[in-house]
Image (spheres, rainbow, N blue to C red):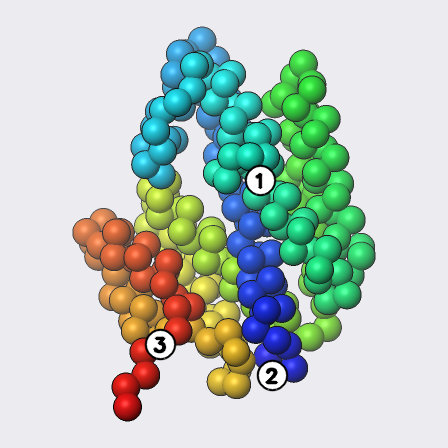
């Protein structure tokens, strides 16, 4: 990515991360909505996955906070807003068509907030985000630009899958996908992964047994994957 600045590389990466965080958070919360039928405080397992404190009065308060509260950095609404903010700056790279899908998602989420049937109102969002990714593939001709977005997307999905204790096969699929994307990163890019933390990730996800024993190590390695490497002189 030699022709793209570090700042733009960073925005591409976080566009991928925030869009995926919105999508995976949304799907997880839809499952929570199903569990909440006739059950009080059925969201505690979700909070435990991330170590969030339970500050919510009831199920409705939880859903409002994690779906629609833009001031909550862990909410779907917050993630979508950050994705859109990066998309605005990157509209020449990703196309206005791609950006329009993020705007459509914002509008749909706002309508769902005021709907009498939130579950039903959220249904179009999955197709809208799939439409966004399809548009990105259609309109981005620079492989390096597309790749850094997809690295962000895969890093985020892998992080969330591990925190939410997905089966190893699901985690492994995203891990392998991430390695393939990282191998496509040119050496001259200003957004280079840290080989120390990549090695830690490889060790922690080498097998299902490693995954069960070293999830914390895997998450730590993933969090520092793009941390600048130390240089000794």
Dot 2 or dot 3: first in sequence order is: 2
Local packing at callout 1 (Cα closer than 10 Å; few below 14, some 14-19, many 20+) is many
Q: Which of 165 and 187 is in front in this view?
A: 187
Q: Residue at (48%, 38%) from the top-left corner?
A: 74
What is the secondary structure assignment of the residue under circle 2? loop
Let me know if residue 26 appears in the view: no
Q: Which of 81 and 16 is in front in this view?
A: 81
> What label sits on residue 229 in the rendered view?
3
Residue 78 locus on image (x, y percent) = 57, 40
Local packing at callout 3 (Cα closer than 10 Å; few below 14, some 14-19, many 20+) is some
Specify whether 223 is left or right of 148.
left
- Which residue is tagged 2? 2
- Which residue is tagged 1? 78
Measure the C-alpha gap from mark 1 to mark 2: 31 Å
Specify whether 202 is left or right of 73.
left
What is the secondary structure assignment of the residue under circle 1? helix
Q: Residue at (38%, 31%) from the top-left corner?
A: 46
Q: Residue at (52%, 78%) from the top-left corner?
A: 190
């Amino acid at each position: 990515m030699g022709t793209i600045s570090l700042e733009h590389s960073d925005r591409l990466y976080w566009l991928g991360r925030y869009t995926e965080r919105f999508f995976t958070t949304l799907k997880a919360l839809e499952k929570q909505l199903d569990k909440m039928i006739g059950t009080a405080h059925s969201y505690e397992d979700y909070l435990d996955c991330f170590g969030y404190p339970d500050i919510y009065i009831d199920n409705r308060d939880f859903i409002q906070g994690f779906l629609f509260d833009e001031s909550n950095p862990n909410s779907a609404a917050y993630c979508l807003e950050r994705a859109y903010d990066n998309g605005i700056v990157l509209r020449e790279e990703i196309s206005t068509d791609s950006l329009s899908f993020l705007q459509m998602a914002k509008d749909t989420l706002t309508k769902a907030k005021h709907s009498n049937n939130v579950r039903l109102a959220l249904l179009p969002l999955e197709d809208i985000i799939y439409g966004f990714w399809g548009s990105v593939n259609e309109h981005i001709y620079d492989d390096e630009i597309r790749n850094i977005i997809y690295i962000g997307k895969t890093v985020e999905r892998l992080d969330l899958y591990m925190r939410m204790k997905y089966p190893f096969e699901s985690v492994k699929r995203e891990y392998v996908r991430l390695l393939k994307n990282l191998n496509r990163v040119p050496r001259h890019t200003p957004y280079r992964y840290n080989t120390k933390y990549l090695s830690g990730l490889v060790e922690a996800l080498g097998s299902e047994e490693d995954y069960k024993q070293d999830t914390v190590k895997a998450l730590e390695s993933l969090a520092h994957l793009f941390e600048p490497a130390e240089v000794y002189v």
